[in-house]
Image: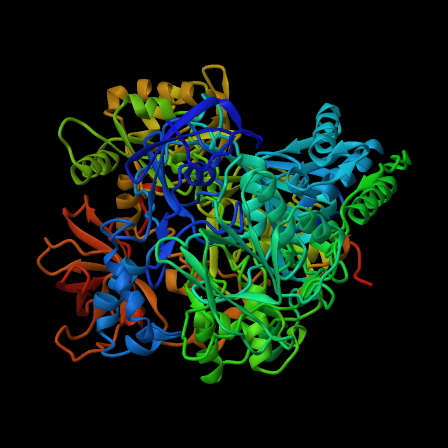
Amino acid sequence: MTQSFRLETGGLINRDKTISFKFNGKNYFGYEGDTLASALIANGVHLIGRSFKYHRPRGFFGAGVDEPYAIVQLYRNGETEPNIKATEQELFEGLEAKSVNCWPSVNFDVGAINNFLKIFLPAGFYYKTFMWPKSFWYKIYEPFIRKAAGLGTASIKHDKERYEHKYEYCDLLITGSGPSGLASAYSAAKNGAKVILAEDKSRFGGTLLTSDVNIGNQSGKEWADSIVSELKEMSNVTIKNRSQVFGYYDHNMLVMSERISDHLPKTKKYHPKQRLWYIRAKEVLISSGSIERPIVFGNNDTPGVMLSSAAKEYMKVYGVLVGKKPLVFTNNDSGYETAIEFKKNGVDPIILDTRKEPQSEIIEEAKNMNIDIKNSYVVVAAQGYKKVKSADIAKISDDKEELGSVENIKCDCICVSGFWTPTIHLASQSGNKTKFNEEIDAFVPGTSKQNEKTLGAANGIYTLEETLKDSFEKGNQLSKEITNNDNKVSFPNVVEKKSTVHDKFWCVPLPKGKNYKRFLDFQNDVAVSDIEIALKEGYRSIEHVKRYTTLGMATDQGKTSNLNGLQLVSKIENKVVPAVGHTTFRPPYSPVSIGAIVGREVGKHSKPTRKSPMHSWHEKNNAVFVDAGVWLRPRYYKRGDENLFEASKREAKNVRTNVGVCDVTTLGKIDIKGPDAAELLNRVYTNAWLKLPVGKARYGVMLREDGIVMDDGTTTRISENHYHMTTTTAQAANVLSHLEYYLQLVWPELNVNVVSTTEQWAGAAIAGPKSREVLKKLFPNSDVTNEGLPFMGYMEGDLFGVKAKIFRISFSGELAYEVNVESDYGYFMWEKIIEAGEEFGIQPYGTEALSTLRIEMGHVAGSELDGRTIPYDNSLEGLISKKKDFIGKRSLSRKAFAAEDRQKIVGVVPLDKKTSIPEGSHLVKDSNAPLPNPKLGYISASCWSVEHDNPFSLAILKDGKNMIGEKLFVMSPLKNKVIPVEIVSSHYVDPKGERVRS
Amino acid sequence: MLHIKCPHCGMRSQNEFSYGGDATVKRPELGEEISDHDWDNFVYNRKSLRGRHWELWQHLSGCRQWIKVERDTATHEIFKTLKANEDIS
């Protein structure tokens, strides 16, 4: 149980608690508080994967969110997740991880042959090579490339974990808990502002955990701990670790993903795995710090080459050495801090500084510790395949163009520091136009677009004192404006070592005769030569160069590569970096799991389910349900071994011969009240409404302004100024909005109120020749005779003590009634109807029988009123009033709508009276005509006519008016069917409409 | 996600609203004689402006009122919201 690269002491890990885990099938152990990366390095594992394109060995480059290499397939509690950064994944007992992008194993990878073929795989290789033949792309090239170049594998299993969404409001959202985040949160919280402080990592404190500073006579970490514990006690502060604010959207809404359970072996009961926060903040303080950037040199992707700040973090936070013979290659003072840390831990580093004679406090300290410092030196190339074994180094001329003689020195890691790049992603996402800061050679936020301010290193401020001062002040000032409190926080005494200016050097020239790969983008294998090719081939815009070479397009989104890429483009183009500009920063800042984005809206929860009050009766009586929008409706009631066809035929036939009952609760219902109600209906519907007497219902059709039928239904005049409108199930919400639109905006002078009552009423349609007998038993005290309640009549009745509305309306074409009671009595009503109807052979019928009945009657429904037809097409032109204007009327006189041979609804019967016609089929004159065979119309709805016992369909047919009696063909290429048919009237049953009036 | 000030309910999230198009379009009077050209313009033709735009929204999951919103279509900045019966100035 030895960890050869773990220091004896130090770090923030808990050495009392060992944790065992598996990597590529081998057992290891680490400590509580380790990441997978720190534990692997402690165990001397540096080879973790293979690169995307060339399959070159990959190690660790960073220690956090910027990591481009160390991507693993993670196994946790029987689930697997791809593309997890080992530098972010906290260690838990039983963790298992595997390398990605290598086959058969990370040590022997067949794909690495690409590395030797790299001369053939330059920028744009895939675009150029796999262009021809075109037909090969989908079947051969693409699957092969995807297999060869993929990262992890997504699980195809259902994810059993729960993910939640949360909405939150706050005065200040602060993104990052480094010095600027803590200082601003503290002073804002002291003013009583509602603060949310988000930290991506598990530990609060950011760089305070690793830097050698002193604040108010405490170490940086002690100061951070004391501030955090005070903030945690404050009721106006929400402080969250493992929480990444990854997106800045419009109107100061930010989205944060909180990883609640990812660091645990198993999600606790009743806990979600992750939670997505939608935060609407009055002010946002971006304290996301900065990321160290690499210096480009030969073979700079060899495992063991890493950021110098990461090396320091592994020592100070995890007590882990990234190497025992380190080389520090730097153009600024940060590298010295890492070297000093090595030295303090008993390891002798060598510093190569590109600068000639830099002088500062930090450098002085390194010198006093007898650290070997070589000025004006660079690393020309790393040597070693699976791990750095040595480095070729050379002196560099003052103009940084000429290399001296190359020498080779032994080392096992190269810690690189090319200065710091502010993390400006959130500011840029908010719309802030960034500006280039010459002094730090990087972009910083410019003028704020939304209510956002950027603090500290994210704003290019690299000294602690200035950062804290500015952050305390901004936190105080912004919160003061919100809360009107002004509780000044006394500024602590800060001790930090002074540093000197960095060298704007970022790329080591190639020595004569050598052609080392010098990588810019480590995850997508984009080298200096690739960018050079792209520019040679004429790509100029940085956005195009990015897409052609894939620079910065990997899962790390170029956190370590973008700026060096820009430096290169501007150098070749002879421009300055700000003239080249940077590519757009888009959310998410760092990958977010699909589960977190989807949240709880999965499976049955992806939409609400609406059920009628009679739902449980249907369930008990073997109903098979169908989705009707968000409603669940009985499709048919299964008896014995019946299938859908048999059951719906039985149910429909029973309506035609006896009596049936159908749950019509789902129909949209709108209550309309007011003195101008009749006038509103008269303007909305195509027919006349001003003279409808109280106690009568009328069928109406409403149009959109473009003349297309919007909806149909019956509306009943309940009393003088009170109407009850019904709509189709699907259009209920749209019709209500439509009425509100005209009442509120177009005709506000109309004194009318509309309100949805769909859910207030339960409805049952009782249909069939014996329906009146059932009604008589249900309402013994009401006169429901043909005279007492004629067709389209309405009355109120007493259903065994329950108030009921009785409408004599019919969708089935039979003598029929619809009874409505308040929803709570729906079940009672239904049971009473079944009970009363028993002696007449009543059967419940579902939507399938309902469709059969309406189709053979030629009644139109959603499949004809499909947003493409006008009243004429549906044979509803008789309902168009010539005397008045209404919504959409003017459109009906448009030329195409008034054409003589306009499409019209017809009936279609197969000549053999046997073959069912698939819905959606086309009607053609000649089934053998050459393609494209002119289409005359289409089948909108099909059924098996129970009246005639043969198939029957409705169709919308060109010149349908003059086509009755014609013989045509129905063609369904999808079902490979050609059916000879005869065109008949759409009213296949009771064309005179005698039954509904009987 | 936009944050829209409903003149009746106050600041509310965009997902409570539905979009209703150009607020400056005026429906011709009922029964008005109107040319095909003018009617087509009313029914179909809308400007797709870049910049300040008065548009309709309905507070669907709130008070159900149609409101007028002046929004910059490029930046999403909202300058002003009005009730249905208030005139765009």
Q: Quadrant of residue A576?
A: bottom right
Q: Name the colour scheme.
A: rainbow
Reply above or below: A456 against A21.
Answer: below
Relative side of B49 to A62, left or right: right
Relative side of A282 to A411, left or right: right
Q: Position of residue A685 (x, y in %)?
A: 54, 54
Reply above or below: A165 against A406.
Answer: above
Q: Position of residue A702 (x, y in %)?
A: 51, 55
Relative side of A572 to B50, left or right: left
**In-front residue for pair A694/A238:** A238
Q: Position of residue B40 (x, y in %)?
A: 57, 74
**In-front residue for pair A974/B29:** A974
Reply above or below: A876 against B14.
Answer: below
Answer yes or no: is residue A459 visible: yes
Quarter of the rendering occupied by the N terminus of chain A: top left
**In-front residue for pair A904/A633:** A633
Answer yes or no: is residue A723 visible: no
Q: Quadrant of residue A421?
A: bottom right
Q: Quadrant of residue A768?
A: top left
Task: Please state the total of marks drawn on the protein image.
Answer: 0
**In-front residue for pair A837/A931:** A931
User: Which residue shows up at 39% across the image and 29% down it?
Assistant: A2
Quarter of the rendering occupied by the C terminus of chain A: top left
User: Which residue shows up at 25% across the image and 68% down it?
Assistant: A141
Q: Position of residue A812 (x, y in %)?
A: 32, 42
Relative side of A179 to A187, left or right: left
